[in-house]
């Protein structure tokens, strides 16, 4: 099956390199994406917003035949949910990697400090301790060396959704920072943070305890978790 992999903030397609080998070995066709404005540090990020990134993924989906699986890390979760809204009949499953669906009117994170059209990767003390679990000094150095400024509009823009059939797209949530038991507790309590997730009719939860960047801290295990979700989808 075709799998489109959408990276989180500050990352390009290469961020999936250590995750995808088991998926390729299993015969899946992989499409890791570099989204507009993330081509290089020197790329222009003017005028690039959340809809720009959703449209880029929709365009990739439309170039493929049949149904696809979407994988979205971090802010990529909002993007793949927007794609599910645009093409609900084309998606076999959405896999949220330490992320979840962003509902109508929400934004990914409008508190990230911006420099013009750019959001540079913040200093490490700008993150919560839970974000940084297993991210060693060496991994932090590698991450910072490869990080590309995120387009401000993607983080600050509001999500706009139109088709309730997005709730029919099955979902897998790979929980890293927070255990899935906490997510289900929030759903049961009606917490607004998980209100959109609670509306999806078929959700499975997989725990992969680590920090916010499992593609760096536990890439082999993340690849296997995605592969198991693919097997269940099949």
Image (spheres, rainbow, N blue to C red):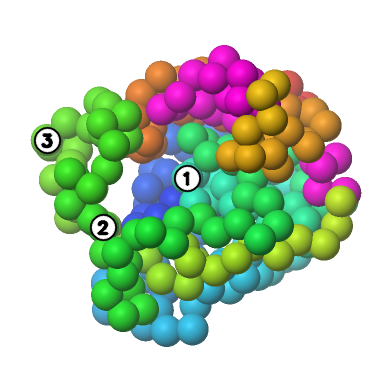
Say what secondary structure mark 1 lies in.
loop
In the visual, does 17 lie left or right of 81?
A: left
Query: Residue at point 17% right, 52% down?
Result: 123
Residue 41, image x, y percentages: 27, 72
Say what secondary structure mark 2 lies in.
loop
Instruction: State the CA–CA distance, disc 2 to disc 1.
Output: 14 Å
Residue 37, image x, y percentages: 42, 73
Instruction: State the CA–CA distance, disc 3 to disc 2.
Output: 16 Å
Mark 3 surroundings: few (<14), some (14-19) or many (≥20) residues within 10 A: few
Above-or-below relation of 199 to 89: above
Above-or-below relation of 215 to 160: above
Say what secondary structure mark 3 lies in.
helix
Residue identifier under label 2: 121
User: Is 23 included in the stretch rendered in magenta?
Assistant: no
Lower position in the chain sequence, tag 3 or tag 2: 2
Task: Give, as a single range, the part of the protein colored magenta.
Answer: 165-187
In the visual, does 77 lie left or right of 34?
A: right
Lower position in the chain sequence, tag 1 or tag 3: 1
Residue identifier under label 1: 74
Mark 2 surroundings: few (<14), some (14-19) or many (≥20) residues within 10 A: some
Query: Residue at point 58% right, 73% down?
Result: 52
Lower position in the chain sequence, tag 2 or tag 1: 1
Residue identifier under label 3: 137
Instruction: Check contact, mark 3 vs mark 2: CB within 8 A.
Output: no
In the visual, does 101 lie left or right of 128?
A: right
Query: Residue at point 73% right, 47% down?
Result: 68
Tell me, for residue 223, which label it has, or none.
none
Instruction: Check contact, mark 1 vs mark 3: CB within 8 A.
Output: no
């Amino acid at each position: 099956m075709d799998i489109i992999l959408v990276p989180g903030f500050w990352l390009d397609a290469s961020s999936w390199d250590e995750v995808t080998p088991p998926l390729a070995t299993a015969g899946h066709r992989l499409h890791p994406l570099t989204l507009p404005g993330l081509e290089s540090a020197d790329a222009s990020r003017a005028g690039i917003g959340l809809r720009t990134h959703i449209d880029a993924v929709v365009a990739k989906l439309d170039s493929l035949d049949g149904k696809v699986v979407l994988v979205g890390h971090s802010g990529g979760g909002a993007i793949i949910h927007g794609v599910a809204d645009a093409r609900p009949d084309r998606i076999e499953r959405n896999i949220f990697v330490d992320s979840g669906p962003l509902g109508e009117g929400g934004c990914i994170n409008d508190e990230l400090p911006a420099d013009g059209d750019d959001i540079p990767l913040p200093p490490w003390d700008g993150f919560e301790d839970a974000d940084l679990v297993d991210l060693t000094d060496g991994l932090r150095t590698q991450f910072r060396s490869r990080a590309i400024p995120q387009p401000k509009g993607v983080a600050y823009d509001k999500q706009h959704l139109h088709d309730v059939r997005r709730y029919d797209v099955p979902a897998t949530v790979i929980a890293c920072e927070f255990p899935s038991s906490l997510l289900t507790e929030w759903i049961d309590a009606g917490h607004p943070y998980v209100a959109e997730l609670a509306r999806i009719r078929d959700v499975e939860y997989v725990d992969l305890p680590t920090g916010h960047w499992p593609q760096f801290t536990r890439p082999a295990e993340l690849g296997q978790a995605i592969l198991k979700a693919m097997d269940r989808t099949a």
